[in-house]
Image (tube, rainbow, N blue to C red):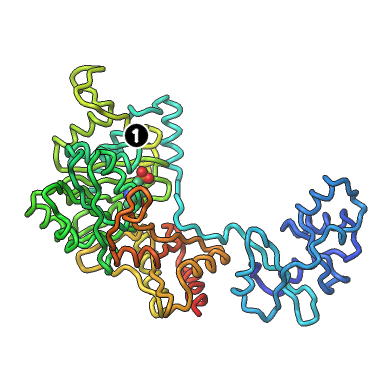
């Protein structure tokens, strides 16, 4: 939307305007003066609106053979969407979209007083990668030295810094988060006949990585408070075939690792943490990923640390780390080149990708501090809006708020999740629905009912959560949510 003071606006409207009987050349001159890609056709200066002509309208007219002297009114949109000067600005903003980019604001006499316009910069994405000069320098070094593949100093440095960050001795870099999970499960020796307990409320990769090994994912319901796997449900699902538990720290909130580790130790089960969304989060002071036997991370483009595509497995156990290094490199013997005692994979990360990761690990504390500020800003800005709830972080939990997500109670909020999402989309606020539950996915399609996970999945959405979101932008999102309520 245009902002600034009244004089600025009046000057801009004058610059953008041309007489209603102007030719195409006249409209093009107005477009040039206003620099917004549009001209307003008016009945005399400051007069009543007669239509809008955009750059695109002129291009199409010229391509269709019209001359610069033909009347602009012939190619104008004579009935554009309009707003009134006394309309609330957010109502006007709600009319703007990629397809309806300009909305003249008219006074009671129909004269143009302002122009609201869609501005890409006012678009707030759910997540946004923020790269700096360090990334550029590191990537440049890879290119200039030729170390672009999976050998090179950045891979080693990324593993070293990530292990130190998590407080574990070993980190094994791989080509994505799904490979990290698969490699961890293979290293534990999982296969056909085994069962792994996985929360149903997660991204598909949590379950697929289990299925890749031939083992069966068994789906658990969530806790209503944290949205994470419910330890009581885990207990209920254990069978003689159960070999492992895979808690997922959803949206940057740690699962109850105290309860999960107690069950695992008592029942002799391995724990693989899917920490793809929770880099740096802590449970009882310890970094997630470092609490179970193995912890897996993703560096996909929208994650807290990103290398474009990438992943990491961390562990305390040297035997597992060694096995994973071998498995990610075609199962090749460390003692003998091109000799393959086990069936391995090519799951290596490139030096180019690790170069991005190293740069981001250098400022990870600042990134997490920003993410936590955004999380706190949402908690206070959303407080008191009836019909909304969100994840409650307990005393043991130090979440990193990968995505700030809310639950919409349609009865109290007056609209359902999907209606709220489309309302926010009109305002340039991108959101995304909570994952569909895994036990209902076509590839798994299980009969069980998991009411908590199903409820969150149907009613939850994630709000813009980039680390560089400003407090004013958080307030803008929260106000848009509050005003959407019926
Ligand atoms: C992103 C993600 C993954 C997979 O990571 P990729 O790098 O995209 O393969 C796994 N689990 C969860 C919960 C994720 O969010």
Dot 1 lies on which element? loop
Residue at 32 percent of width and 29 percent of height: 346
- Answer yes or no: is residue 248 visible: yes
The N terminus - image quarter: bottom right
Residue farthest along the left direction in this orientation: 266
Is 320 drawn above or below residue 98 in the view shown?
above
Q: Nearer the viewer, residue 224 or 375?
A: 224
Q: Is residue 106 left or right of residue 314?
A: right
**What x and y, as percent, mark residue 399?**
29, 61
Q: Which of 117 and 425 is in front in this view?
A: 425
Task: Quadrant for residue 201, please give it.
Answer: bottom left
Q: Mark 1 points at which residue?
A: 349
**x, y percentage for residue 132?**
45, 46
| Quarter of image, res 450 | bottom left
Question: Which quadrant would residue 36 be assigned to in this image?
Answer: bottom right
Up-down relation of residue 80 to residue 276 (above or below): below
State the image coordinates of residue 251 (x, y, percent, origin top left).
Answer: 34, 58
Whole-percent x and y of residue 40? 80, 64
Q: Residue at x 43, y 75 (%)?
A: 410
Is 24 left, or right, of 132 in this rendering?
right
Residue 381 falls left or right of residue 156:
right
Mark 1 Cβ inside 8 Å of ligand 1: no
Residues 461 and 167: in front is 461
The residue nearer to you, when weighing 241 against 202, is: 241
* Numbered circles on residues, count: 1
């Amino acid at each position: 939307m245009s902002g600034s003071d009244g004089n600025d606006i009046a000057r801009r409207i004058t610059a953008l305007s041309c007489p209603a009987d102007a030719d195409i050349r006249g409209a093009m001159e107005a477009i040039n003066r206003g620099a917004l890609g549009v001209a307003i056709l008016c009945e005399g200066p400051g007069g009543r609106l007669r239509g809008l002509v955009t750059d695109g309208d002129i291009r199409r007219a010229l391509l269709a053979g019209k001359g610069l002297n033909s009347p602009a009114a012939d190619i104008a949109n004579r009935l554009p969407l309009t707003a009134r000067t006394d309309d609330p600005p957010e109502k006007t903003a709600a009319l703007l979209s990629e397809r309806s980019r300009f909305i003249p604001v008219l006074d009671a006499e129909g004269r143009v007083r302002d122009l609201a316009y869609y501005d890409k910069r006012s678009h707030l994405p759910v997540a946004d990668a923020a790269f700096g000069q360090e990334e550029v320098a590191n990537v440049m070094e890879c290119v200039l030295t030729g170390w672009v593949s999976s050998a090179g100093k950045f891979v080693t440095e990324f593993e070293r810094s990530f292990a130190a960050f998590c407080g574990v001795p070993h980190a094994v870099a791989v080509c994505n988060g799904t490979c990290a999970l698969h490699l961890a499960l293979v290293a534990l020796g999982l296969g056909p006949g085994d069962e792994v307990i996985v929360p149903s409320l997660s991204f598909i990769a949590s379950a697929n990585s289990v299925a890749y090994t031939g083992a069966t994912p068994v789906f658990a319901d969530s806790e209503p408070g944290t949205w994470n796997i419910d330890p009581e449900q885990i207990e209920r699902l254990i069978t003689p075939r159960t070999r492992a538990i895979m808690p997922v720290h959803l949206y940057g909130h740690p699962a109850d690792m105290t309860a999960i580790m107690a069950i695992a130790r008592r029942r002799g089960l391995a724990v693989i943490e899917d920490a793809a969304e929770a880099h740096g989060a802590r449970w009882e002071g310890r970094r997630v990923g470092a609490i179970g036997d193995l912890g897996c991370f993703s560096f996909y483009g929208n994650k807290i640390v990103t290398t474009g595509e990438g992943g990491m497995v961390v562990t305390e156990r040297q035997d597992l780390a060694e096995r994973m290094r071998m498995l990610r490199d075609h199962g090749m013997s460390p003692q003998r080149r091109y000799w393959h005692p086990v069936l391995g994979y090519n799951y290596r990360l490139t030096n180019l990708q690790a170069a991005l990761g190293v740069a981001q690990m250098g400022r990870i504390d600042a990134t997490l501090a920003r993410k936590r500020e955004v999380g706190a800003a949402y908690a206070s800005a959303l407080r008191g809006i009836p019909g909304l709830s969100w994840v409650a972080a307990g005393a043991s939990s130090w979440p990193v708020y990968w995505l700030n997500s809310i639950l919409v109670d349609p009865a109290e909020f007056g609209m359902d999740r999907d209606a709220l999402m489309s309302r926010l989309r009109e305002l340039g606020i991108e959101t995304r629905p909570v994952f569909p539950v895994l036990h209902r996915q076509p590839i798994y399609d299980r009969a069980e009912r998991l009411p908590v996970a199903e409820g969150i999945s149907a009613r939850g959405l994630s709000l813009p959560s980039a680390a560089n979101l400003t407090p004013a932008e958080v307030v803008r999102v929260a106000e848009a949510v509050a005003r959407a309520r019926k």
